[in-house]
Amino acid sequence: MSFERLSQYRNMWVMVFFDLPTTTKQEVRNYTLFRKRLQKDGFGMFQFSIYLRHCPSRENAMVHIKRVKKSLPPNGHVGIMLVTDKQFGMMELFFGKKEKPPPEIPQQLSLF
């Protein structure tokens, strides 16, 4: 097994899905704070209520999942999904009827 193939199973994507209420000013603040915390932790918007982050390992992904759990708002639904880089690469994405390539893996420096 080559290193490239091995890394496709080692590298992980953390996806955070959420549906949060925004009917009161406090709920809007909670929604905004949750999104900002995701962005501060390196998550990027995939769709309006779906954010994702590339991680070099499962252990690193668990660190970010723990941070998401710490910043959960008091109300609403939040889902967290962890997939391998290989699984993520098999996703088919479309913009209208045109197929769109998946997001590129960000360059990351890992210090050991």
Image (tube, grey):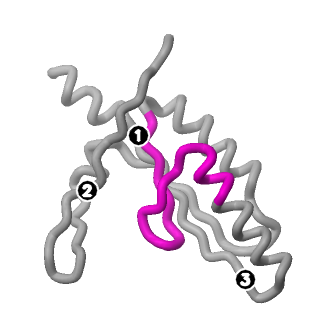
Q: Circle 2: is it few (<14), some (14-19), or many (20+) Cα within 10 Å? A: few
From the image, state whether disc 3 or disc 1 is nearer to you. Answer: 3
Asked whether residue 42 is drawn in magenta, I would say yes
Q: Position of residue 98 (x, y in %)?
A: 14, 76
Mark 3 touching mark 2, by CB under 8 A? no
From the image, state whether disc 2 or disc 1 is nearer to you. Answer: 2
**Which residue corresponds to the image point at 54% horizontal and 65% vertical from the top-left?**
17
Give the residue pinned by disc 1: 12
From the image, which quarter does the N terminus lie in? Answer: top left
Residue type of the residue flagged with mark 3: Thr
- What residue span does the magenta drawing correspond to? 36-55
Marks 2 and 1, Cα distance to the nearest angstrom?
14 Å
Q: Position of residue 84 (x, y in %)?
A: 35, 43
**Which residue corresponds to the image point at 45% horizontal and 20% vertical from the top-left?**
110
Q: Circle 1: is it few (<14), some (14-19), or many (20+) Cα within 10 Å? A: many
Q: Establish if 112 lies above or below 39.
A: above
Residue 51 is marked as none
Q: Quadrant of residue 25?
A: bottom right
Marks 3 and 1, Cα distance to the nearest angstrom?
31 Å
Q: Nearer the viewer, residue 103 or 88?
A: 103
Q: Nearer the viewer, residue 8 or 100?
A: 100
Residue 22 is marked as 3
Residue at far right of view = 26
Q: Establish if 57 lies above or below 80.
A: above
Marks 3 and 2, Cα distance to the nearest angstrom?
30 Å
Label 1: state its secondary structure: strand
Q: Position of residue 54 (x, y in %)?
A: 42, 42
Give the residue pinned by disc 2: 102
Residue type of the residue flagged with mark 2: Pro
